[in-house]
Amino acid sequence: MAPSLENSPEGNTYGNNDRQYPDVNWEEMGFSLTPTDYMYVMKCSTGEDFSQESLIPYGNIELSPCSGILNYGQGLFEGLKAYRKEDGQILLFRPEQNALRMKAGAERLCMPSPSIEQFVDAVKQTVLANERWVPPFGKGSMYVRPLLMGSGAILGVGPAPEYTFLVYASPVGSYHKHQRSLNLVVEEKHHRASSGGTGGIKAVANYSPVLNALTRAKAQGFSDVLFLDAATGKYIDEGSACNIFSVKGNTISTPPAHGIILPGITRKSIIKIALTLDYQVEERPVTIDELMDADEAFCTGTAMVVASISSVTHQGRRIEYKTQADAVSQKLRETLTGIQMGRLEDTMGWVVEVN
Ligand SMILES: *Cc1c(COP(=O)(O)O)cnc(C)c1O
């Protein structure tokens, strides 16, 4: 089914293949939802495999008031981006990594998960069905949001009897639209995750507990919070939805992804790129004192890609970092986005063509 163009009377034609875009101001787009045409849905009951996929018009879904997701937070999300290349080709970045992470999260939350092939295929179908919403080359990206949830009714605490895998998409611009770099504040009251918990998976229930700290930080003018480890309060964990790196000389350090911090795909890719650019990379516990003494610091995540940190505030002390064009984070960002957008050769085999 061809996506309907009736909502875009002023849709503009772009490029040499007469692509019809919706009426979106690509330049002004931030990281917020612009509903698109279709979403992908697939269900399964406990003990069965996911089947009967469908692409249906994007819209509200029906859920039992007694569903596992609504009552017990039995749910996971993922996030990945599709970029349009100069020649019109659409690229995904390491989608199988998101599929693997969802699989690991599903095991932790006692949910069945789509196979890696089903996941990647669902993402591709969602992007293609909404192709007119993939921004023109250089104007942003299409953010794809897969969800896995216990949709069946379950009254006593236990795994739900039915599961829904759903994928929707939205064109997005920059995550921190009006900020070139981030001002972080160290959270002194709350922790994000602890040993044996669910910090290492994208469980939906991990995110409402950070809202209190994030809201307080934003009210004080900060871009994000920085969480410290729950056990000692001496080591840095990560931000509300991004991993953190510290740079000293030629050495880049980041906390290890062993179950407490979220194993970011951007994090993993940046480590690889940094090694190929001859930086020394250390995955090890990093103290807050060490971060406060670093030359440079940056955050990584699909939404923001690589964002330099301009300051960290800890117990009232504010440290400023260099954020110039020659910063390490800028070089890493250039290389990563170059590969993601198809401007640089993909020697790692990371990008996947959609169309
Ligand atoms: C999603 C997420 C990240 C970044 O992961 P990417 O795969 O790079 O997008 C980092 N930290 C948290 C808490 C996250 O939810």
Image (cartoon, grey):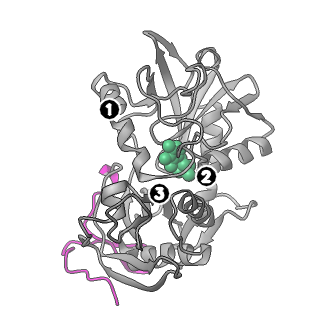
The label shown at residue 156 is none
In the figure, 25 relative to 199: above or below? below
Q: How many marks?
A: 3
Residue to which mark 2 is pinned: 265
Q: Is residue 280 left or right of residue 166?
A: right
The label shown at residue 212 is 1
Mark 2 or 1 closer to N-term? 1
* Span highlighted in magenta in the image: 1-28
Badge 3 crowding class, 10 Å Cα cut-off, few under 14, some 14 to 19, many 20 or more, is: few
Residue drawn at x 40%, y 49% as measured from the top left: 205
Residue to which mark 3 is pinned: 138
Badge 1 crowding class, 10 Å Cα cut-off, few under 14, some 14 to 19, many 20 or more, is: few
Taking depth in this image into account, of 314 and 114 the one nearest to the observer is: 114
In the figure, 3 relative to 260: above or below? below
- Whole-angstrom CA distance, mark 2 to mark 1, is 26 Å
Residue 174 visible: no
Q: Name the front one of labels 2 and 1.
A: 1
